Image: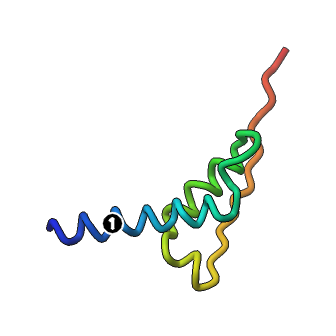
Amino acid sequence: MRVIGVILVIWLIIGAIAGAQRHYYNGNASCARAGTIALTIAAGPLNYVGANPKVKCHAPQPSR
């Protein structure tokens, strides 16, 4: 079980590094940006073999 935990942590760290290399952590926060960051981190090393996850979402506008 411990080996699986270590592999999972390394997987997520590699995904976080991929997000940093793509400059996802700079700029405005939005639904699409947060989703893309989360998906990039979850994809981990797959980012380096061609995966380029993107999320499109539209948050509802507040009523007046």
Report the front residue among 62 and 52. 52
Q: How many marks?
A: 1
Specify the farthest residue to the bottom: 49
Report the front residue among 58 and 46. 46
Q: Position of residue 13 (x, y in %)?
A: 44, 62
Specify the farthest residue to the right: 64
Q: Position of residue 63 (x, y in %)?
A: 81, 19
Q: Amino acid at mark 1?
A: Leu
Which residue was labeled with disc 1? 8
25 left or right of 9 in image: right
Mark 1, Cα crowd under 10 Å, few <14 / some 14-19 / many 20+, is: some
Residue at x 71% of width, y 47% of height: 26
| Quadrant in the rendering for residue 1 | bottom left
- The C terminus lies in quadrant: top right
Residue at x 63% of width, y 52% of height: 35
Residue at x 64% of width, y 83% of height: 50
